């Protein structure tokens, strides 16, 4: 297993919310249980994050975008967003260029330059010990089920 450093955006923006330098030091309590107050854990409980908004907006006013699907086929997902917003489709594959350094597609500007996400975006998910992965999966299972039920769609998490 390798330890990985905390996303620098979170660390720089909210250092007071973090308890250590690694994901594991933040996501798990000293006894090994999942730390629900960890920002990474709390923000990933989508049921809790979106439930308050359902008081003001109907479910059909939300579009949940699967980030993994977006990484695989940006144009299809962005076309879905255009359709959801009721606007004409403008996004086509010729507006993207593959950046071999980043291993991601970037937007091609009118001048032909590449406009890519910041370097901390689009990272692969680091490995966790199998036991930590199982703890997180077990912790998130009920939250994910509530979220799936709320929006009537399942995701492969």
Image (tube, rainbow, N blue to C red):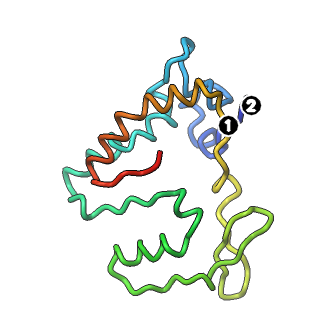
The number of numbered discs placed on residues in the rendered structure image is 2
At 38% from the left edge and 59% from the top edge, which residue is drawn?
64
Cα separation between marks 1 and 2: 7 Å
How far across and how far down the image is residue 19, in percent?
59, 24
How far across and how far down the image is residue 11, in percent?
63, 38
The mark nearer the N terminus, 1 or 2, is: 2
Left or right of 61 on screen, residue 89: right
> Is residue 73 positioned above or below 46 on the image?
below
Residue 27: which numbered mark, if any? Answer: none
Dot 1 falls on a residue whose secondary structure is: loop
Closer to the camera, 81 or 128? 128
At 63% from the left edge and 85% from the top edge, which residue is drawn?
94
Left or right of 120 on screen, residue 19: left
Dot 2 falls on a residue whose secondary structure is: loop
Residue, disc 1: 127
Left or right of 76 on screen, residue 22: right
Residue 2: which numbered mark, if any? Answer: 2
């Amino acid at each position: 297993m390798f330890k990985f450093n905390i996303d620098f955006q979170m660390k720089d923006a909210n250092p007071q919310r973090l308890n250590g330098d690694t994901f594991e030091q933040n996501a798990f309590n000293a006894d090994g249980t999942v730390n629900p107050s960890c920002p990474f854990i709390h923000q990933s409980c989508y049921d809790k994050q979106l439930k308050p908004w359902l008081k003001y907006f109907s479910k059909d006013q939300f579009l949940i975008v699967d980030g993994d699907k977006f990484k695989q086929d940006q144009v299809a997902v962005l076309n879905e967003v255009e359709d959801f917003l009721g606007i004409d489709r403008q996004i086509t594959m010729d507006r993207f260029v593959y950046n071999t350094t980043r291993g991601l597609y970037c937007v091609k500007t009118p001048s032909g330059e590449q406009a890519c996400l910041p370097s901390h975006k689009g990272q692969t998910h680091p490995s966790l010990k199998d036991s930590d992965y199982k703890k997180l999966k077990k912790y998130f299972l009920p939250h994910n089920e509530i979220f799936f039920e709320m929006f009537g769609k399942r995701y492969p998490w």
